[in-house]
Image (cartoon, helix red, strand yellow):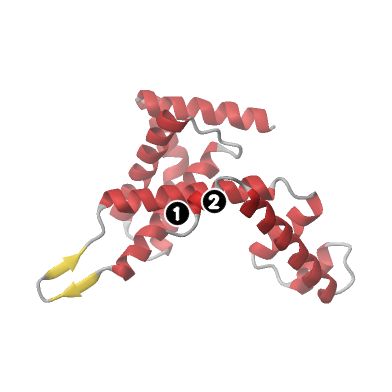
Amino acid sequence: MVELLQMDGKFYLEALVNGDSKTISKIYQKNFLGVKKFVLQNKGNIEDAQDVFQKALLQIAVRHKKEGIIIKSSFDAYVFTVCKNLWRRELNSYKKRVTNSEGIEQISEYTANAYALVEQKRHELFLEKLNEISDNCKKILTMFFAKTSYAEIVETTEYTSEAVVRQRVFKCKKKLTDLVKGDQRYNSLREL
């Protein structure tokens, strides 16, 4: 399954790098509506969604050409995550802009894109390390990160109480944190 996802991802990545307009059009058809919905639900408009989507595709193409990305999830999920991270970064930059009587100080687009790329790499490192922990830990943490209540986790697993689930979440988070911090890429991706 992972090999099929990687082949699918490689096909789309190459299409982006080579400017294959027919395939890029398919990428838009498959992915833009989800991105638009996310942006509209998070204080944006259609133009914002179009800008974010375009920036994401450009960022993915440039990064693949420069570094050779290997996508281990579906290409569609990867594109959505990049768009989501770019939009969140954009929302955060609105908060950081300083207004004075002479105008608005804006973060350069280059800097914003660099931050978004670092954020994407952090997300990829996190997912990679999440896949390295035990299936049990992965299941528990996935539910925990999805804001599933401890009571619901008890109901859907073999654990007997919320206290046991809390302890298991704590141990699994520690294991995941240790794996992330133990990776050589961690220091270069720490908060800027």
Measuring from the top left, give residue 19's x and y in whole percent.
35, 25
Q: Residues within 10 Å of mark 2 (few under 14, many from 20)?
A: some
- Locate residue 104 relative to residue 192 in the image: left or right: left
Residue 35 visible within the image = no
Question: Are discs 2 and 1 less than 8 Å apart at CB?
Answer: yes
Residue corresponding to mark 2: 123
126, 37: nearer the viewer: 126
Q: Residue at x 75, y 66 (%)?
A: 169
186, 49: nearer the viewer: 186
> The disc labelled 1 sits on which kind of residue?
Asn
Q: Which residue is drawn at 47% across and 39% down?
A: 30
Give the spatial CA distance, label 2 vs label 1.
9 Å
The circle on residue 152 is: none
Whether residue 138 is situated above or below residue 79 in the rendered picture: below
Q: Quadrant of residue 144?
A: bottom right
> The disc labelled 2 sits on which kind of residue?
His
Q: Residue at x 64, y 63 (%)?
A: 146
Q: In what quadrant of the picture does the C terminus appear?
A: bottom left
Residue corresponding to mark 1: 85
Whether residue 184 is situated above or below residue 100 in the rendered picture: above
Callout 1 secondary element: helix
